[in-house]
Amino acid sequence: MSSPKSVLFGFHAVTVRLKTHPDSVAEVHFDPARRDQRMRAFIERAKEGGAKLVESSDERLTQLAGSPRHQGVVARVATLAQSHSLDDVLDAAESEGKGPPLVLVLDGVTDPHNLGACLRVADGAGAHAVVAPKDRAVGLNATVAKVASGAAETVPYLMVTNLARTLNELKERDIWVVGTSDQAERSIYDLDLNRPIAFVLGAEGEGMRQLTAKTCDELVRIPMAGAVESLNVSVASGVCLYEVLRQRTTAGRR
Ligand SMILES: C[S@@+](CC[C@H](N)C(=O)[O-])C[C@H]1O[C@@H](n2cnc3c(N)ncnc32)[C@H](O)[C@@H]1O
């Protein structure tokens, strides 16, 4: 029986899938009219990975991707099974010596561009997982993967049934659960983040749900020096996760 297929588009998203799960790539469609260096290098890599290459027109690629932003590259791929739980992911990170747990929790991020950007920054900062509630989140689709530039393949994205319960489970693992709100009193720059940590961010508009905020150990704000009240959720994720990385890296150098 063949596994369900989905599409990935854009150079980064397809290249990372070829690197991480080459067997899951059924076909790579590309635009033969594009003969630049980037495309030539990409085709070389796809051939090395054993992918079936198919020449397709720009129009056909747009149709396959469901978007004109495919950069001349669309892959039909098998959907990867999400067999692991958050516990499995954190256990694996620990046994691989990846440092204290670092988790990004997104309560209500339904925009694929925002999720893609959050996954990208989570990968960059070395987060071990991104977690979201099943009923208040966007799933991993082709737009998310394109915006994530490959990070949708590298950072486990776990959709959970009950977010408050998951936050309590993180606390039981001695992970400090820190919620973020532009209304919080304490600044993120006053925290010692060199410890197991989960940052919780909320939706554009209404922010975190009340129960989510109540379940957090601490609420912090990112200082805002100008006129606007808050940052985009992916930018705020970047500030939080990179502050953890900065503190942990600095501590490692001492
Ligand atoms: C666009 S903001 C939503 C703003 C919303 N008015 C609120 O009450 O949080 C989306 C998310 O990014 C994070 N965020 C944005 N700006 C922030 C700030 N200055 N301090 C802390 N978190 C912030 C929060 O997690 C927030 O829920």
Image: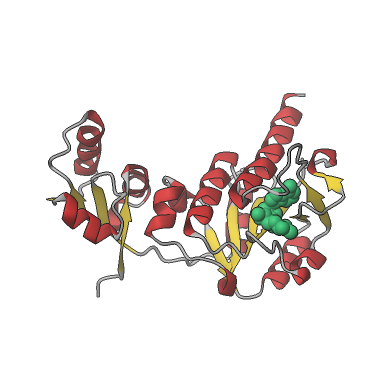
How did the renderer colour the structure? secondary structure
The quadrant of the picture occupied by the N terminus is bottom left
Q: At which x and y percent is residue 211?
A: 77, 71
Tell me what residue is drawn at x 52 percent, y 64 percent: 84
Left or right position of 178 against 39: right
Rendering quarter of residue 254? top right
Instruction: Depth check: give the residue in front, 254 or 125.
Output: 125
Tell me what residue is drawn at x 72 percent, y 62 percent: 170
Q: At which x and y percent is residue 193?
A: 77, 42
Q: Residue furthest top?
A: 254
Q: Note whether residue 227 is visible.
A: yes
Left or right position of 161 against 58: right
Tell me what residue is drawn at x 60 percent, y 47 percent: 127
- In the image, residue 156 sits, relative to residue 121, either above or below, namely below
Left or right position of 17 against 215: left
- In the image, residue 170 sits, relative to residue 69, either above or below, namely below
Instruction: Depth check: give the residue in front, 98 or 118.
Output: 118
Q: Residue furthest front?
A: 227
- In the image, residue 22 sits, relative to residue 2, either above or below, namely above
Give the number of callouts: 0
Tell me what residue is drawn at x 32 percent, y 43 percent: 11
Rendering quarter of residue 212? bottom right
Q: At which x and y percent is residue 121?
A: 56, 44
Instruction: Depth check: give the residue in front, 151 or 34.
Output: 34
Left or right position of 162 against 156: right
Instruction: Depth check: give the residue in front, 7 or 51.
Output: 7
